[in-house]
Image (cartoon, grey):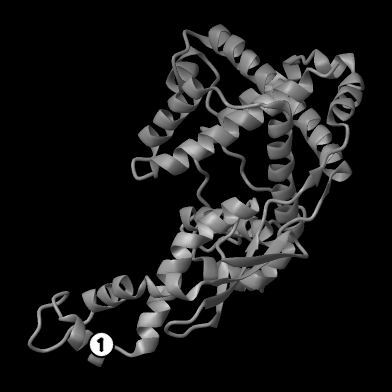
Amino acid sequence: MKITVKKLPKSEVEIEGELEADKFESYFAQALKKVGENLELDGFRKGKIPESVLLSKVPEISILEEMAQLALGEHYPKILEDEKIDAISRPEISITKLARKNPLGFKIKTATLPAIKLPDYKKIAKNIISKITDAEKNVTVTEEDLENMIIDIRKSRAPKVHMAEGADPVHKEGETHPEPELPEFNDEFVKALGPFKDVADFKEKLKINLKLEKENTQKEKTRLKIIDEIIEGSTLDLPEILVEIELDKILYRMESDIAQMGLQFDDYLKHLNKTKDDLRKDFRKDAEKKAKLALVLNEISKVEKIVADSEQVAKEVAAILEQYKEADPERARMHAEQVLTNEKIFQFLETQQ
């Protein structure tokens, strides 16, 4: 097979080639049989039409197209392997020569995993971590933090205030509306919230949770600084297909959230006076950043040989499949591997002191 590979912008490649005539012709019988499986003719059972009848009833172009599909379906993976092409998208295939007893001519365009030049990510992480103050390291929960959270919890459990029929829901200047009466904060109240013995037990556990929440917020803030700087210092030719995939994810999550609120997405778009294309433009920078993040983390994992623990992956997959009964096990495994690997990468970066 004659093959030439041309690099295109945005980490795409164009593969142009020809499959020899005799090899292409070898797919004829298989293609004819496959076309015949779906053909219905009076007097014949489906899939049992004789070859001579098929040849008289099926247009040659239909057989040739099936031959091309079978040939490229078998040879495309071999081309990628032989040419060492890391394809990350479905190929766009165009046939340039298609005739019996002739070579099959084709062009294939696909996006590839881009070459990435990383900055000194260890130095970046070390520099950012060195600037964390003692106050940021030693997170504390004040009495004010505790009381504010307790008030929020009491408000969430307060009975709803129903306005009189015909009352104007808009607040006018100088007008006051009745605040809901908060439930009393006592042992009975906290026991209704969960497995708490009394107010003191509830406060102690709430303080632990608030401290953990503050620590996680601080950790995420530090991680964001580190990865933002690493992305900023990285050089890569971002494939468009990855940006489009991230945009699809963003819009899918948005549609799901709107649906859970009991609203129609089309109505939501009308309210915003936007189209889906407008939203794709609005979220493009976010999608580009997410795509770059995935590529940068993947490159660091390769360089540092960081992989997720297989036992942890298995446990995470089991938990996902338990919660989402219809989930695809393979996709669940890929998701678990990615999440756990990324966590190990961030833990590695956080040790650069």
Of 330 and 13, the residue lying toward us = 13
- Image quarter of residue 304: top right
> At 44% from the left edge and 69% from the top edge, which residue is drawn?
23
Image side of residue 92 versus residue 145, left or right:
left
Of 186 and 126, the residue lying toward us = 126
Total numbered badges shown on the rendered structure = 1
Of 253 and 30, the residue lying toward us = 30
> At 77% from the left edge and 48% from the top edge, which residue is drawn?
115
> At 92% from the left edge and 22% from the top edge, which residue is drawn?
131
- Residue 82, position in %: x, y? 60, 52
Report which residue position mark 1 lands on. Answer: 55
- Image quarter of residue 83: bottom right
- Amino acid carrying label 1: it is Leu
**Quarter in which the C terminus is drawn:** top right
Q: Secondary structure at mark 1?
A: helix
**Quarter in which the N terminus is drawn:** bottom right
- Residue 267, position in %: x, y? 54, 70
- Residue 103, position in %: x, y? 51, 77
Is residue 287 visible to us here?
yes
Image side of residue 183 versus residue 179, left or right:
left
Q: Is residue 344 above or below residue 289?
A: above
Is residue 148 visible to us here?
no
Of 52 and 316, the residue lying toward us = 52
> At 89% from the left edge and 26% from the top edge, which residue is drawn?
123
Can you name the residue that lies furthest to the front here? 22
Q: Residues within 10 Å of mark 1 (few under 14, many from 20)?
A: few
- Residue 59, position in %: x, y? 33, 90
Q: Is residue 241 above or below residue 328?
A: below
Image side of residue 351 versus residue 266, left or right:
right
